[in-house]
């Protein structure tokens, strides 16, 4: 059998994606050299974006398997190199669609990404665990999902989703780590030894701006932002940076939490955002005999939805109620979201139902170009 042609080998390599960027290595200019001798032995050089690429062994393995699958290839020798400054600059420009300035892709009128800011009036209502499980459930539904841990002081999303490595930085572009099909960025990835973050408003705004503009998210269907409790600097920055963001309000059933949650949703009257709905967490405890114990009262989620409906003048739905479930807490601690570790449990079923409702929502036409030209 004759040795395969260079074109045949390039076609095979086009099926290999960079594990962080999720685009073919041939498109990204990562194939630095490719030769094959008469005996079918292939020598290929793959140019890494950075020398310390954390997934280079996977890339090397994928290239080897792709080439060995070509008829006539008898052996493969993969050499890993590193892109030059000029090659990295060309890569950054390619990924940014030719734009030279940093910009937030989700703020563009033509963006098809649905952006949800998960907000709560007070801490301790399970906002982050709801965010993590919704993200994983949406990814399981086949959507491309990203999460920004915008709770700068109380970051917890990486642990909950199971992210166990730091981002890769290609000059001024950041490749977010991925776990379970969800891309994640958090200030916790840049803080050593769980040290506290002591920043004021302008630094919070700049950090959020970098997470949105400097991180290469690729083509996302949904972006979730886990906001800190309340209506402070980060909530205002989100409204400024991505005006089309929709708000998901998380509350618990008790009256005190519901009253505070209303304020988190009412910020939409000042920022001109849309409230997508209300999620009630810790709604009840299911007892062994099938009855429900309302440990924190009842009706708080519906009260928030009704109050926001009156205030905003549009129907704000109660998207779902999540019962108390010890496996939800266990999954969050272990980096194994309950929608995967116990999908048929009380919390898993409720969260997957909420995610399904969000997945079926359209982005709407607000702020988008319709492609119409006046005659």
Image (cartoon, rainbow, N blue to C red):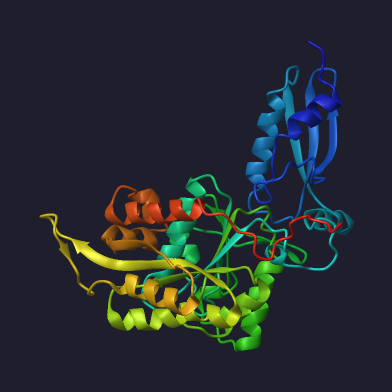
Above or below residue 107? Residue 43 is above
Q: Quadrant of the N terminus?
A: top right
Residue 159 or 165: which is nearer the viewer? 159
Q: Is residue 16 above or below residue 218?
A: above
Q: Residue furthest bottom?
A: 200
Instruction: State left or right for residue 339 relative to residue 344.
Output: right
Q: Residue at x 34, y 80 (%)?
A: 257
Q: Position of residue 201 (x, y in %)?
A: 61, 87
Q: Relative to 334, is 174 on the left or the right?
A: right
Front-most of residues 340 and 320: 320
Judged from this view, the residue extending furthest toward the right is 86
In the displayed structure, would residue 107 be above or below residue 327? below
Residue at 44%, 71% in the rendered image? 249
The image quadrant of residue 347 is: bottom left
Q: Is residue 269 left or right of residue 209?
A: left
Where residue 316 sits in the image (x, y, percent)? 44, 68
Does residue 228 appear anywhere in the picture?
no
- Which x, y percent locates residue 126? 38, 70
Please state, as top left, top right, bottom left or bottom right, where the C terminus lies in the image: bottom right
Q: How many marks?
A: 0
- Image quadrant in which you'd find residue 232: bottom right
Q: Residue 296 or 132: which is nearer the viewer?
A: 296
Residue 43, position in %: x, y?
Answer: 80, 32
Q: Residue at x 21, y 64 (%)?
A: 285
Is residue 223 shown to the viewer in this render? yes
């Amino acid at each position: 059998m004759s040795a395969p042609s260079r074109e045949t080998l390039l076609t095979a390599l086009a099926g290999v994606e960079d594990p962080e960027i999720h685009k073919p290595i041939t498109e990204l200019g990562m194939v630095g050299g490719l030769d094959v001798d008469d005996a079918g032995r292939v020598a290929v050089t793959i140019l890494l974006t950075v020398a310390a690429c954390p997934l280079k062994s996977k890339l090397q393995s994928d290239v080897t398997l792709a080439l060995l699958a070509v008829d006539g290839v008898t052996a493969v020798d993969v050499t890993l190199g590193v892109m030059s400054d000029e090659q990295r600059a060309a890569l950054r420009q390619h990924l940014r669609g030719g734009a030279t300035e940093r910009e937030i892709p989700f703020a563009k009128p033509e963006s098809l990404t649905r952006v949800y800011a998960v907000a709560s009036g007070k801490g301790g209502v399970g906002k982050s665990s709801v965010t993590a499980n919704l993200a994983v459930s949406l990814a399981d539904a086949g959507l491309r999902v990203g999460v920004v841990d915008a709770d700068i002081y109380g970051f917890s999303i990486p642990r909950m989703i199971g992210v166990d490595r730091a981002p890769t930085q290609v000059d001024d572009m950041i490749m977010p780590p991925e776990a379970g099909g969800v891309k994640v960025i958090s200030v916790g990835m840049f803080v050593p030894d769980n040290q506290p973050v002591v920043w004021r408003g302008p630094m919070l705004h700049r950090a959020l701006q970098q997470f949105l503009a400097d991180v290469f998210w690729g083509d996302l269907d949904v972006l979730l932002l886990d906001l800190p409790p309340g209506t402070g600097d980060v909530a205002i920055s989100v409204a400024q940076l991505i005006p089309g963001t929709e708000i998901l309000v998380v509350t618990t059933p008790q009256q005190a939490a519901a009253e505070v949650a209303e304020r988190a949703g009412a910020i939409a009257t000042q920022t001109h955002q849309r409230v997508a709905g209300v999620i009630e967490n810790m709604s009840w405890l299911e007892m062994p005999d099938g009855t429900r114990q309302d440990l924190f009262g009842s009706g708080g989620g519906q009260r928030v939805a009704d109050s926001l409906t009156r205030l905003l003048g549009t129907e704000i739905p109660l998207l779902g109620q999540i019962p108390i479930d010890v496996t939800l807490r266990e999954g969050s601690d272990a980096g194994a979201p309950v929608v995967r570790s116990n999908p048929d449990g009380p919390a898993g079923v409720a969260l997957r139902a909420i995610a399904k409702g969000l997945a079926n929502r359209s982005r709407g036409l607000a702020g988008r170009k319709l492609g119409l030209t006046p005659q």
